[in-house]
């Protein structure tokens, strides 16, 4: 089963609620399907101009490599040329920092949530909580 628009919207809205509960700075959340296509993008008031691209870049990297963006971040420290090459292949769209979390069901990747706006650790925590609240498994890497 694929990630539905209804599920993607619910997760994105949950991210905004959780961000408010966590008292995060204004966030932007992108929910992508398993093919890396944007399903939902929500921006809280007060976000800066590149946040949609950053949120999508975190999620796209997670889907492209089949690992949360925290794992990509760790890999970038150990293999910077590899991650730099991947970023070149994606036209610079990969954002290798925490905040891109895979959405899994029964081990299968259904999509990813990317959040940006606060610290990367808080972005990741918010995405993970929203994914799990929707009944899926969160894979932050």
Image (cartoon, rainbow, N blue to C red):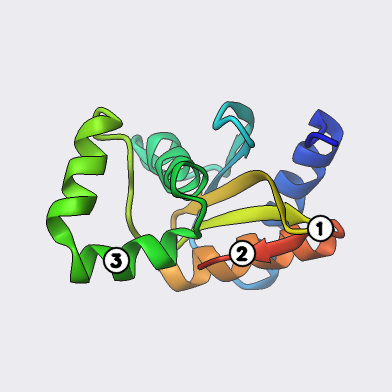
Which is nearer the eye, 9 or 139?
139
Sort mark 2 into few (<14), some (14-19) or many (20+) by Cα contacts within 10 Å: many
Closest to the observer, 75 or 94: 75
Tell me: residue 96, above or below residue 21: above
- Kind of element beneath mark 2: strand
Residue 24 appears anywhere in the view: no
Above/below status of 25 relative to 30: below
Q: Which residue is mark 1?
A: 106
Label located before the other in sequence (3 or 2): 3
Pick the front one: 29 or 25: 29
Q: Residue 20, position in %: x, y?
A: 66, 63
Q: Is residue 79 visible?
A: yes
Q: Which of the two discs, 2 and 1, sits closer to the camera?
A: 1
Q: Which residue is mark 2?
A: 139
Say whether disc 2 or disc 1 marks the residue closer to the N-terminus: 1
Residue 28 rendering spot, x and y as whole percentages: 52, 45
**Quadrant placement of the N terminus:** top right
**Drawn side of residue 3 relative to residue 113, left or right:** right
Q: Which mark is residue 131?
A: none
Q: Residue at x 73, y 58 (%)?
A: 107
Q: Are marks 3 and 1 in contact (CB under 8 Å)?
A: no
Is the residue under label 2 in contact with that under label 3 (CB below 8 Å)? no
On screen, residue 106 above or below 120: above
Q: Position of residue 5 (x, y in %)?
A: 80, 29
Q: CA distance from mark 3 to mark 2?
A: 16 Å
Residue of label 3: 75
């Amino acid at each position: 089963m694929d990630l539905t628009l209804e599920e993607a919207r619910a997760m994105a809205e949950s991210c905004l609620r959780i961000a408010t509960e966590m008292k995060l700075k204004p966030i932007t959340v992108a929910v992508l399907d398993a093919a890396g296509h944007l399903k939902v993008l929500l921006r809280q008031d007060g976000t800066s101009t590149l946040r949609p691209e950053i949120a999508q870049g975190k999620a796209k990297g997670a889907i492209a490599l089949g690992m949360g963006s925290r794992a990509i971040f760790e890999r970038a420290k150990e293999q910077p040329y590899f991650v730099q090459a991947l970023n070149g292949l994606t036209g610079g769209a990969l954002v290798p920092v925490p905040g891109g979390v895979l959405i899994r069901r029964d081990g299968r990747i259904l999509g990813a949530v990317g959040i940006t706006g606060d610290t990367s650790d808080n972005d990741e925590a918010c995405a993970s909580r929203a994914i799990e609240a929707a009944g899926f498994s969160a894979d932050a890497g």
